[in-house]
Amino acid sequence: MDGTPADCVHLGVNAMLPERPRLIVSGINKGGNLGDDITYSGTVSAAFEGTLLGIPSFAISLVSRSHFKFDVAARFAARVARRIIGKGLSRDTLLNINVPNLDEKKIKTYKITQQGRWVHNGSAVIEKVDPRGKKYYWIGGGQLIFDKKRGTDFEAVSNSYISVTPLHLDLTHYPSIGD
């Protein structure tokens, strides 16, 4: 079988589970899903699919590349799940949660944030050659920095806060629609 995380949610809800779940939790992802990266994220897309199916959903990611401290993220995920089961989420809204890879005592608390943006410095693609002599490209090879705008997911995580970003299903830019 082959499919995306969103396919797995769709198949599970519509074909495999005996009853609809009350909540979809996608993750805990190894590595952050911050800023623009949410558009490429399988973890976020699975929560997006759950929301499309009318099921409250959230994605949770641990912001690290190694030495993962899943216990902190797992406890926070359980806390969020209890709250959503009890109070629900706004219609067509999912949460994207990013947890700093720190000991619990070093995490300040959580912040409700907005999606940040990466600032690309023009060297985001690197051309390489594999051991067989074939060219390949590494996307994201340049040093990426995030926009210093306040209140973003990047700012929260870099300052030892858990970032909780509400996302909406409708990505339409309404001002661009003519009369």
Image (cartoon, rainbow, N blue to C red):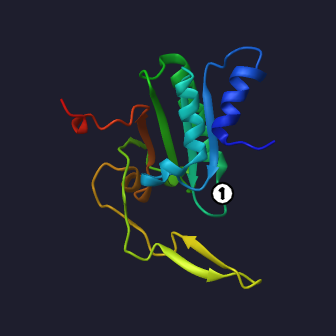
**Residue shown at the point (61%, 38%) measured from the top left:** 75
Vertical comparison of 179 with 136: above or below? above
Quadrant assignment, res 175? top left
Which quadrant of the rendered structure holds the C terminus?
A: top left
Total numbered badges shown on the rendered structure: 1
Q: Is residue 122 left or right of residue 16?
A: left
Q: Is residue 131 above or below residue 166?
A: below
Mark 1 secondary-structure assignment: loop
Looking at the rendering, in which quadrant would you find the N terminus? Answer: top right
* Residue that lies at the very extreme toward the front in this rendered image: 179
Depth check: 86 or 88 in front? Answer: 88
Q: Position of residue 89 (x, y in %)?
A: 46, 23
Amino acid type, callout 1: Phe
Question: Residue 30: x, y in percent?
Answer: 64, 54
Q: Label 1, on which residue?
A: 68
Is residue 76 in view from this perspective? no
**Viewer-side residue, 133 vs 14:** 133
Near-viewer residue (155 or 94): 94
Residue located 72% across and 42% down the image: 3
Q: Please identify the quarter of the rendering in which residue 133 is found.
A: bottom right
> In this picture, is 80 found above or below 137?
above
Q: Residue furthest top?
A: 19
- Position of 98 with respect to 165 (left or right) is right
Could you classify mark 1 by the number of other residues whose Cα lies within 10 Å: few (under 14), some (14-19), or many (20 or more)? Answer: some
Q: Residue furthest left?
A: 179
Which residue is located at x 57 percent, y 34 percent? 47
Between 139 and 149, the one lying in front of the other is 139
Position above or below: 82 against 60: above
Q: Position of residue 135 (x, y in %)?
A: 65, 80
State whether residue 4 appears in this view. yes
Instruction: Report the residue at 66% width, 46% height from top.
Output: 71
